């Protein structure tokens, strides 16, 4: 006897809504950067922000901090380095490794982009109360923890 498979629609899939919202938030941020004359991706923005929070990380640790795999962090850092936004200095303990820092141009770019990002955040969060946003963050954090522990 065949077992009936329980089906559900995309609209019932939490993963679908998480992915869809991520794609739309990222696309809108990229467009906001472009509209302001900056050729920067949200992924590059995240890496610059990660560096602002903790400079001197090696490529591997920066990738972990920003949830970028080895290939993506390499590609992103290459682009940021080419544009003069970061500086790579040899690690004193391991000459094969580099420590990564914000270059003056990177610091300046972060300052220029701050109002764009704040406006984008306001657009994304329109209609939410502050306590609702805290709950959403907590719920998303719970999802991450659920999957990390399993």
Image (cartoon, rainbow, N blue to C red):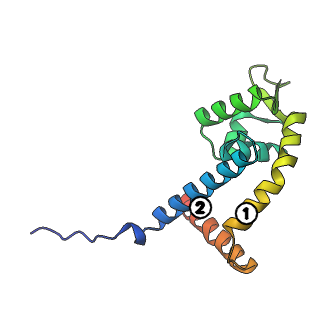
For residue 49, which numbered disc appears in the image? none
Q: Is residue 52 visible?
A: yes
Where in the figure is residue 138, as x and y percent of width and height? Answer: 66, 71
Q: Give whichever of 8, 65 is nearer the camera.
A: 8
Q: Residue at x 72, y 80 (%)?
A: 129
Residue underneath mark 2: 144
Q: Quadrant of residue 118?
A: bottom right
Answer above or below: position of 141 versus 116: below
In the picture, measured across the screen, residue 135 lies left or right of residue 13, that is right
Q: Residue 6: x percent and y percent?
A: 27, 71
Residue at 69% over, 70% down: 125
- Residue 69 image offset from top left, x and y in percent: 59, 39
Q: Which residue sits at x=68%, y=79%?
A: 132
Residue depicted at 83% across the width and 56% down the height: 115
Q: Residue lying farthest top?
A: 95
In this view, which residue lies farthest toward the left? 1
Visible residue check, residue 150: no
Identify the image quadrant of the N terminus.
bottom left
Label 1 environment density (alpha carbons within 10 Å; few <14, some 14–19, many ≥20): few
65 on left or right of 143? right
Q: Position of residue 127 (x, y in %)?
A: 67, 77
Q: Which residue is mark 1?
A: 121
Q: Earlier in the sequence, mark 2 or mark 1?
A: 1
Q: Secondary structure at mark 2?
A: helix
Number of marks? 2
Q: Secondary structure at mark 1?
A: helix
């Amino acid at each position: 006897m065949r077992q009936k498979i329980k089906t559900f629609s995309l609209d019932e899939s939490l993963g679908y809504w998480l992915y869809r919202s991520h794609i739309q938030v990222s696309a809108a941020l990229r467009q906001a950067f472009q509209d302001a004359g900056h050729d920067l991706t949200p992924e590059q923005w995240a890496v610059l922000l990660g560096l602002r929070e903790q400079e001197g990380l090696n490529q591997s640790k920066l990738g972990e901090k920003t949830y970028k795999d080895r290939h993506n962090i390499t590609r992103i850092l290459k682009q940021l380095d080419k544009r003069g936004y970061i500086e790579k200095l040899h690690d004193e303990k391991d000459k094969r490794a580099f420590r990564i820092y914000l270059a003056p141009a990177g610091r300046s770019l972060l300052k220029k982009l701050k109002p764009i990002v704040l406006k984008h955040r306001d657009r994304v969060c329109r209609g939410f109360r502050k306590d609702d946003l805290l709950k959403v963050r907590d719920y998303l954090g719970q999802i991450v923890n659920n999957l990390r522990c399993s």
